[in-house]
Amino acid sequence: MATSEELHKRRVEAVARGVGSTIPAYVDRAGGGTITDVDGREWIDFAAGIAVTNVGNSAPRVVEAVRAQVERFTHTCFMVAPYESYVAVCEQLNAVTPGGFEKRSALFNSGAEAVENAVKIARHATGRPAVVVFEHAYHGRTNLTMALTAKNMPYKHRFGPFAGEVYRVPMSYPLRDGGLDGATAAARSIEMIEKQVGAENVAALLIEPIQGEGGFVVPAPGFLPALREWATAAGVVFVADEIQTGFCRTGDWFACAHEGVEPDLVTLAKGIAGGLPLAAVTGRAELMDAVHVGGLGGTYGGNPIACAAALAAMETMRELDLAAAARRIGAVMGERLGAIAARDRRVAEVRGRGAMLAVEIVVPGTLTPDPAATAAISAACHAAGLLTLTCGTYGNVLRFLPPLVISDDELARGLDILDAAFG
Ligand code: PLZ
């Protein structure tokens, strides 16, 4: 087998430079809480492919379902010749997402595509143009979703012009907004919408219930419920982007559930299918069904192999109670991170929920972000065999997203490496 070094040489000659990788090691196999590279080195996985392999890599049920489906048929296109698994995935999403009302779903390939379609549906159903998004938001890399995403580098830089009718308002970010309570922070955002956009022009308010790429920002309690209430009164479609938070990651099936918020539409991807590309928009039947026949779709959306994987992944989440597993992982990680924060003044805050936790790194005694220290700690983790990711508008957040099937021993070993990386 080629070594990582050899593969890297080939990669530089073949793969566009714009596509980066976190670690220089090339994967041979992965499962449970580990990844093994082609040089035989084992990595503890605190990334889960960016919150995708919640059920673990090559989860047994997923492997079995995919194998069986590949043998039956690989693709007919649901828009041409439909099949049961697409319908079954939609039935399950309608049942498992927050909100006791009648729902419909449509399936796509990527998170960005789900977000694009949620905006299409909200605009079509309301006849209004504007979309409101938040500071630090991340919603994807396509043209519309670049406009919805906050951060310039690396996502938007020199890729404009961007789609119009996108308006950005402040997020509730307790560490950096003086600890505004949720209701006050929401009132500030709502006033900006009403003064600068006009509620009657707004089709959708789009928000990550816990921000992902933007820094694992957890809004103050009450922020999401207040926005939900305002959206209802203003006839604005409340869209929760649960692409990173979804499918048991935060200790519940969806992060909105923690505050009892029922979105009108929810965008789903990542954890949905155990690593196969699948995404969805799920929401109120009257909004989803407002769109004319043929108005939504795509060649591969709801591909039968991805649908088979999704059904198996959701079954695994139920069978292993991965929401409870996420809460357990969160308790163990939270305790260790708390101990690190207590001794290392570079840690301004430990935050997140369930198995979606992060630490924000600053210059001690200030709130000045320290991306260099963050990168150094991350590099020390990588050198010792722990795969961690960074995020945040300021690049100063270390985030931890282990597969929810990680063993106690793997988790403990990963946390030992992390502990040592802080010095
Ligand atoms: N919405 C909340 O987290 C994807 C992006 C990685 P796609 N986040 C990982 C990168 O650098 O490209 C994401 C997300 C939220 C939307 C998306 C977009 O999902 O499947 O990457 O298109």
Image: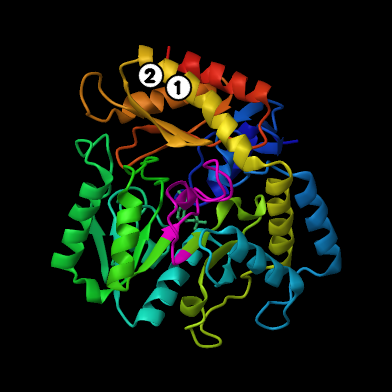
Q: Is residue 193 above or below residue 151?
A: below
- In depth, the one of 325 and 371 nearer the eye is 325
The secondary structure type at the circle numbered 2 is helix
Please provide percent x and percent y for residue 228.
35, 60
Looking at the image, residue 206 sits to the left or right of residue 336; the answer is left
Residue at position x 55%, y 57% from top? Answer: 269
Please provide percent x and percent y for residue 116.
44, 68
- In depth, the one of 122 and 56 nearer the eye is 122
**Magenta-span inclusion, residue 244:** yes
Residue identified by numbered label 1: 337
Please count the marks in the image: 2
Residue at position x 25%, y 49% from top? Answer: 183
Residue identified by numbered label 2: 341
Instruction: Name the kind of residue labelled 1 in the image.
Output: Leu
The secondary structure type at the circle numbered 1 is helix
- In depth, the one of 173 and 226 nearer the eye is 226
Q: Is residue 415 above or below residue 83?
A: above
- In depth, the one of 54 and 92 nearer the eye is 92
Residue 162 visible within the image: no
Q: CA distance from mark 1 to mark 2?
A: 6 Å
Please provide percent x and percent y for residue 104.
57, 73
Q: Residue furthest left?
A: 195
**Magenta-span inclusion, residue 261:** yes
Instruction: Name the kind of residue labelled 2 in the image.
Output: Ala
For the residues labelled 1 and 2, say whether their Cβ atoms are less than 8 Å apart.
Answer: yes
Quarter the C terminus occupies: top left
The magenta segment: 240-265
Residue at position x 58%, y 50% from top? Answer: 247
Residue at position x 36%, y 48% from top? Answer: 154
